[in-house]
Amino acid sequence: MKRIAVFPGSFDPITKGHEDIILRAIPLFDEIIVAIGTNSSKNYYFDLEKRLEMIRYTFRNEPKIKAETYTGLTVDYCKQVNATHLLRGLRTSADFEFERSIAHINQTLYPELDTVFLLSLQEYSAINSTIVRDILFNGGDASRFVPDGLDLSK
């Protein structure tokens, strides 16, 4: 059986923390789908195509990684793509408590899906997309917090 992991998020934008979790997960899976969930009621800094472009650029040399979009419940998307695992990164104990609850619900809805948690490296634990967006929105240089070489223009 092919080990397919889904790493869901809004990736608005993708950060070095996201990149690190995905790169460290490569040996664990046959395929990793970086899945951008869409929510019509949420205002994004970068449009969907730009976020896909950033992810694809970041992992352009990693054949096991692909980027896709989905709507609806993440667990339903996992069923659709025959995912065996849901990949999540943890920065804080609060992240763990939140993610653990979701993992239990997902396991009830899709028992074949296991959630795998990877701890963020200490140097990335303070980075999140909200902070990066705030830096960008206010005209700051956020390049040190995102994967190298990303075009952060809208």
Image: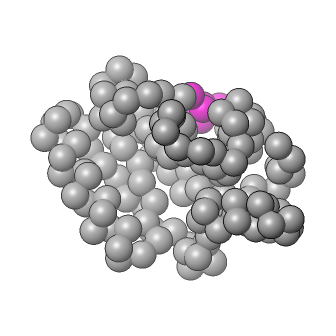
The quarter of the picture where the C terminus appears is: top right
Q: Residue at x 54, y 28 (%)?
A: 69
Give the magenta-colored segment's residue range: 63-68
Residue at image location 31% in from the left, 59% down from the top: 99
Predominant SS along the magenta part: strand
**Residue 29, located in which quarter of the rendered image?**
top left
The residue that appears at 58% across and 76% down in the rendered structure is: 126
Of 43 and 4, which appears nearest the observer?
43
The quarter in which the N terminus is drawn is top left
> Relative to 4, does residue 96 appear above or below in the rendering?
below
**Rendering coords of residue 51 (x, y %):** 68, 39
Most foreground residue, 22 or 94: 94
Percent across and percent down for residue 116 are: 35, 53
Left or right for 148, reference 24: right
User: Is residue 65 part of the magenta span, yes or no?
Assistant: yes
* Image coordinates for residue 66, horizontal then vertical, percent: 60, 31
Q: Does residue 144 appear left or right of residue 91 in this picture?
A: right
Percent x, y of residue 93: 35, 76
Name the foreground residue: 50 vs 123: 50
Residue extending farthest to the left is 108
13 vs 35: above or below: below
Q: Could you tell me if residue 149 is visible in this image?
A: yes
Residue 35 seen:
no
Q: Which residue lies furthest to the top in this view?
A: 80
| Residue under the point 86% across and 65% down | 139
Examine the rendered structure and indicate whether residue 44 appears above or below residue 122. Answer: above
Residue 49 as seen in the image, left or right of residue 128: right
